[in-house]
């Protein structure tokens, strides 16, 4: 068995060696071909990769080219827009140049007319002188024929006669010149006023006492109303408006005579609906934040108005008052729009008259600042506005123009009548004002002021077109028994001092709140 195993082992070794020799010979013969084949495959792969990279580079190049072409196109558009603006400015400058040429031509014609009149007057004076000389010669001849007269007496008689005749002739010439000057002045004044009105045009007044708040679906209405109406009552009490939720699809109506309150309620509703948390405490917090935002917006409006009109150096408080004009109206005419229009009219008219256009524009913008006081003054708005302007270091002629635009103080500068005329032009054009709305707003304001005059009252809101007055009192100042007396007293005072249609419901609200914070 051992021999057979040894033979098998030797045979296996011989076979293995033969196979190894065979594989080595096969490898030596086939390896160059394999290497060549692998080399070819590598070249093909490299070529493919090269093609891919070329395609990628080409694609990036095309994309970059497209971006550059787009950028070049945008630059070309910007250049084109700049050229258009330059062309518009050039047209505007050409128009101004034509206007200046026209004025120069008119002045030249006026100068020539005056020169002609002067020449005519000089000619008449020469003729008068010649006539005087002839008369003197004739009178001297006659006096020489009259016996009993000395030379001095004849001279005195001649002088008196000539004086009377010269006075008559001179008076006649003076009357003709004055009549001509009056006709020319009236014609020029009418031209200036008409040209001023034509160059400044604005929209007619739009009266609006409600704001529509749009919602995505009617399910939001239930959340705004809240359980037993507590949310909507809290919003009405905080903002001082009336919220009307009816069958109108996807809309809630905010009613109130004060545009600032309506805007605060609208923005507060928008934030509450977007946030989703609607409850009384959250409502009061949001309304308080919105009020601060509105105050900032008022200041920004005032700054932007001053910049647009080119008025610089206004006191910050005057800028805030100008911004508040956006939320006030005068007989239905928006007060800020009226002030801007009056300022532009003043500038145009002052330029036509050769006065300081910047001062006139400044006075025109500020002439109605007395209509937006933080506290109710006991004087006309023109005088109060002049007092405010003087307080915030405006120049005396500006203060006088503000206070005298309703003839409640004496005019001491040429700007004052310009402001008065331009204020009348702005308010008198068709559709500018509506007295009914102004009387309505004043009646609602008077309702609130009467209630605020009682001690313990913290807030008052006139709602439902003045048919209801809600009075909020401090819980620490008035008890439950006193609110009934207060409601009766307010109703009696309103009945005795005011005139109004129908009846007014007075609702006095007293509530106690306890607020704590978990930290």
Image: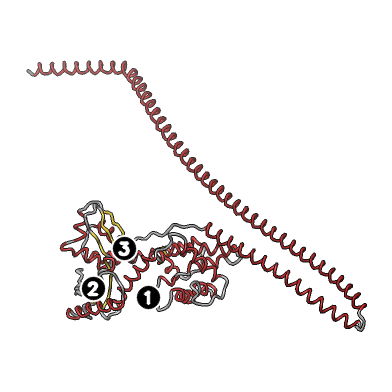
Q: Are marks 1 and 3 in contact (CB under 8 Å)?
A: no
Mark 2 and mark 3: Cα distance apart in space: 22 Å
Query: Residue 467 or 419: which is nearer the viewer?
Result: 467
Mark 1 and mark 3: Cα distance apart in space: 20 Å
**Marking on residue 205:** none
SS for tag 3?
helix
Q: How is the image coloured?
A: secondary structure
**Marking on residue 506:** 2
- Which quadrant, please, contains the C terminus? bottom left
Q: Are marks 2 and 3 in contact (CB under 8 Å)?
A: no
Q: Position of residue 383 (x, y in %)?
A: 46, 76
Residue 170 placement, left or right of 422? right
Q: Are marks 2 and 1 in contact (CB under 8 Å)?
A: no
Q: Which residue is mark 1?
A: 375
Residue 108 placement, left or right of 301? right
Q: Which residue is mark 3?
A: 262
Q: Earlier in the sequence, mark 2 or mark 1?
A: 1
The quarter holding residue 379 reads: bottom left
SS for tag 1?
loop
Residue located at (47% from left, 42% from top) = 71
Badge 3 local density, few (<14 within 10 Å), some, or many (20+)? many
Q: Earlier in the sequence, mark 1 or mark 3?
A: 3
- Which quadrant, please, contains the N terminus? top left
SS for tag 2?
strand
Q: Position of residue 20 (x, y in %)?
A: 24, 18
Query: Residue 264 or 514: which is nearer the viewer?
Result: 264
The quarter holding residue 275 reads: bottom left
| 8 vs 292: above or below | above
Badge 1 local density, few (<14 within 10 Å), some, or many (20+)? few
């Amino acid at each position: 068995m051992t021999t057979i195993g040894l033979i098998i082992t030797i045979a296996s070794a011989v076979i293995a060696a033969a196979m190894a020799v065979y594989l080595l010979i096969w490898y030596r013969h086939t390896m160059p071909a394999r290497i060549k084949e692998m080399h070819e495959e590598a070249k093909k792969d490299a070529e493919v990769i090269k093609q891919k990279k070329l395609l990628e580079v080409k694609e990036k190049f095309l994309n970059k080219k497209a971006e550059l072409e787009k950028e070049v196109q945008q630059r070309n558009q910007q250049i084109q827009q700049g050229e258009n603006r330059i062309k518009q400015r050039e047209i505007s400058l050409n128009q101004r140049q034509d206007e200046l040429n026209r004025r120069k031509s008119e002045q030249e014609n006026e100068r020539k007319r005056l020169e002609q009149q002067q020449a005519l007057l000089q000619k008449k004076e020469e003729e008068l002188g010649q006539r005087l000389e002839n008369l003197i010669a004739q009178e001297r001849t006659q006096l020489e024929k009259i016996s009993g007269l000395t030379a001095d007496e004849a001279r005195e008689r001649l002088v008196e006669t000539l004086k009377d005749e010269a006075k008559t002739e001179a008076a006649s010439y003076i009357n003709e010149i004055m009549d001509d000057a009056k006709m020319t002045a009236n014609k020029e004044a009418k031209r200036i006023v008409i040209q001023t009105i034509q160059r400044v045009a604005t929209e007619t007044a739009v009266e609006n006492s409600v704001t529509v708040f749009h919602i995505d679906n009617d399910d939001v209405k239930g959340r705004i109303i809240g359980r037993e109406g507590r949310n909507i009552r809290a919003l009405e009490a905080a903002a001082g408006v009336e919220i009307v939720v009816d069958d109108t699809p996807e809309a809630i109506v905010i009613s109130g005579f004060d545009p600032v309150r309506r805007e605060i309620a609208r923005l507060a509703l928008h934030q509450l609906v977007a946030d989703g948390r609607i409850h009384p405490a959250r409502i009061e917090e949001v309304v308080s934040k919105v009020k601060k935002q509105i105050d900032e917006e008022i200041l920004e409006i005032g700054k932007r108005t001053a910049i647009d009109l080119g008025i610089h150096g206004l006191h910050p408080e005057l800028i805030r008052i100008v911004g508040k004009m956006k939320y006030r109206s005068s007989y239905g005419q928006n007060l800020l729009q009226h002030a801007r229009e009056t300022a532009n009219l003043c500038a145009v008219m002052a330029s036509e008259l050769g006065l300081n256009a910047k001062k006139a524009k400044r006075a025109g913008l500020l002439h109605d600042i007395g209509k937006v006081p933080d506290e109710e003054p006991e004087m006309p708005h023109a005088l109060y506005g002049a007092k405010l302007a003087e307080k915030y270091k405006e120049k005396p002629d500006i203060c006088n123009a503000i206070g005298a635009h309703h003839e409640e103080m004496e005019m001491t500068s040429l700007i004052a009548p310009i402001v008065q005329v331009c204020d009348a032009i702005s308010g008198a054009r068709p559709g500018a004002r509506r007295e009914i709305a102004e009387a309505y707003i004043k009646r609602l304001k008077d309702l609130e002021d009467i209630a605020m005059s009682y001690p313990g009252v913290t807030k008052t809101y006139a709602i439902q077109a003045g048919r209801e007055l809600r009075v909020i009192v401090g819980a620490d100042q008035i008890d439950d028994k006193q609110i009934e007396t207060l409601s009766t007293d307010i109703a009696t005072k309103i009945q005795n001092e005011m005139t109004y249609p129908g009846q007014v419901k007075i609702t006095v609200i007293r509530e106690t709140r306890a607020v704590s914070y978990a930290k």
